[in-house]
């Protein structure tokens, strides 16, 4: 997938220096966009952080002159009997200062308030990858050049309340992104706050390391959910961005205490922002928490790439990778009712999406409890063609839970969510298709009113009683 394709898919805008853009499907008929970080031709996609230049950080800038760096022991070292570091490897890792002095990184389009080679060297040492090369260039772009995306989400997202703000002409303003291991692109609006800029550049440096050490390749095909689905992309984002946010937090603690802990502004934006903002921050926060729980030091983060969680359920509940296989779930189209399901227009969203959706109306503990027990989900699109040539579209989103009590908890939270919707919001109806399976019906009013869903927990049939 090209960088342009991904950026056009990234339909989120969140203020701050290291906030996310997790793209929904780019069209109504996709199986979403590719889950691959690079295409078969080797053209990498982008890892994006977003910023709201109109809300600069209150942090005071720090001096661009870096402090002196003292040599640090290798992460493989352990204290000896005399209290000194007993190196268990052949040679100790060089200090960040020594590494930075050997780098050749060009800065184009302006100047940085911090010494980027030193930022990258600190990250490389922090993650125990001191031999990884930095990017060739850090490119500074004006704010207007960092705006991407369209003005609306795909229809299914809009039906659930995910919308681009009316005050914005474009969906995404990027603070920084890594399109390849050779270049970090940064928004000049980020640079007014030196501490925030350093924190953002540290986050992007983690992505460069991920590129150069094959982290993205390690993640290929590991998700249990369908490749390219929303669930697989949210999980991938949680692993990739969560790891970067976790390392960024450790970087801030060690080297940039003037900058806020990266999860703090993310949590504030999630609590006070739009549904789109909450969805965007979700993988960063969930991923960072998971990585923090799984590893004891940033030098161990590579184990998460090597053996990642297979579902958001495993990530959210700290379960071993592969321990929660998907339950069987098929959504079938009843023939002869005038509505036809497009087999290509299907998606799976996962527990993180379900939880985040409910959090837009209920408190986080209630949403977490209601999404708990997620076992699988399938969304299909249904289309009917009227005699006047018009086309009507409806969606059936089946969610299977581990047992009936989990499905009941979801249904209760869903009713609160539905009651909280604006008066002019489209109709959404929930049908209990089986003890552990619910089906949300959205879209065309006739489809929502007349569709029925029945069957078993593993196989649901959707039928529409009439089309007129």
Image (cartoon, grey):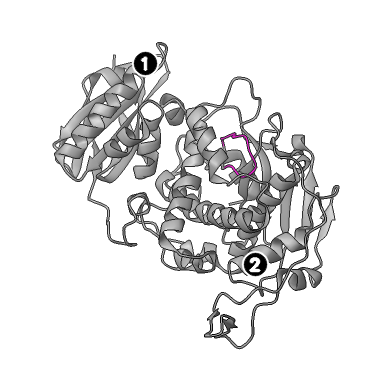
Q: Residue at x 76, y 69 (%)?
A: 97
Q: On the image, which quarter does residue 51 sit in?
A: top right
Q: Residue at x 61, y 71 (%)?
A: 129
Magenta region, main secondary structure: loop
Q: Position of residue 439 (x, y in %)?
A: 25, 32
Q: Position of residue 351 (x, y in %)?
A: 34, 43
Q: Position of residue 361 (x, y in %)?
A: 38, 25
Per the image, the residue denoted by label 2 is 124
Q: With 240 as the anchor, is 412 left or right in this view?
A: left
The disc at residue 387 is 1
Q: Residue at x 36, y 57 (%)?
A: 310
Instruction: Please tell me how crowded label 1 is: few (under 14), some (14-19), or many (20+) other residues with Cα within 10 Å.
Output: few
The answer for how far apart the CA atoms under marks 1 and 2 are is 64 Å
Residue 417 lies, with reference to residue 266, above or below; the image says: above
Q: On the image, which quarter does residue 437 sit in?
A: top left
Quadrant of the image containing the C terminus? top left
Range covered by the magenta-colored residues: 11-19
Residue 337 visible? The answer is no
Question: Helix, strand, or loop for circle 2?
Answer: helix
């Amino acid at each position: 997938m090209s960088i342009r394709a991904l950026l056009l898919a990234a339909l989120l805008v969140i203020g701050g220096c290291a906030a996310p853009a997790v793209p929904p499907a780019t069209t109504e008929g996709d199986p979403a966009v590719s889950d691959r970080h690079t295409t078969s031709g080797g053209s990498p996609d982008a890892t994006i952080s977003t910023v709201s230049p109109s809300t600069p950080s209150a942090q005071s800038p720090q001096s661009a002159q870096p402090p002196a760096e003292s040599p640090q022991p290798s992460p493989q070292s352990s204290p000896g009997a005399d209290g000194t570091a007993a190196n268990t490897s052949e040679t100790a890792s060089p200090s960040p200062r020594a590494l930075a002095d050997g780098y050749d990184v060009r800065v184009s389009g302006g100047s940085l308030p911090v010494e980027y080679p030193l930022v990258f060297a600190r990250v490389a040492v922090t993650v125990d990858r001191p031999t990884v090369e930095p990017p060739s260039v850090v490119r500074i772009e004006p704010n207007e050049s960092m705006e991407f995306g369209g003005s609306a989400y795909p229809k299914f997202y809009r039906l659930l309340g995910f919308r681009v703000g009316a005050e914005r002409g474009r969906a995404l303003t990027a603070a920084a992104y890594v399109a390849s291991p050779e270049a970090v692109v940064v928004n000049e609006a980020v640079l007014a706050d030196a501490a925030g800029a350093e924190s953002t550049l540290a986050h992007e440096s983690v992505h460069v390391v991920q590129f150069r050490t094959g982290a993205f390749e390690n993640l290929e095909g590991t998700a249990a959910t369908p490749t390219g689905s929303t669930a697989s992309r949210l999980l991938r984002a949680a692993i990739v961005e969560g790891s970067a946010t976790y390392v960024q937090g450790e970087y801030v603690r060690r080297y940039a205490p003037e900058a806020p802990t990266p999860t703090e502004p993310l949590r504030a934006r999630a609590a006070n922002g739009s549904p789109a903002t909450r969805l965007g921050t979700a993988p960063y926060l969930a991923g960072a928490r998971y990585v923090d729980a799984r590893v004891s030091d940033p030098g161990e983060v590579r184990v998460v790439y090597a053996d990642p969680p297979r579902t958001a359920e495993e990530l959210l509940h700290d379960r071993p990778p592969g321990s929660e296989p998907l339950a069987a779930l098929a959504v079938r189209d009843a023939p002869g009712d005038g509505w036809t399901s497009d087999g290509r227009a299907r998606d799976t969203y996962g527990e993180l999406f379900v939880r985040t959706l409910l959090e837009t109306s209920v408190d986080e503990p209630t949403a977490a409890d209601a999404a708990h027990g997620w076992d699988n989900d399938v969304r299909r699109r249904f289309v009917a063609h009227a005699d006047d040539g018009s086309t009507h579209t409806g969606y059936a989103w089946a969610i299977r839970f581990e047992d009936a009590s989990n499905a009941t908890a979801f249904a209760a939270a869903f009713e609160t969510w539905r009651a909280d919707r604006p008066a002019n919001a489209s109709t959404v109806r929930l049908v209990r298709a089986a003890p552990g399976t619910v089906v949300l019906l959205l879209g065309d009013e006739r489809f929502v009113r007349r569709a029925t869903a029945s069957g078993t927990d593993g196989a649901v049939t959707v039928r529409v009683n009439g089309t007129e």
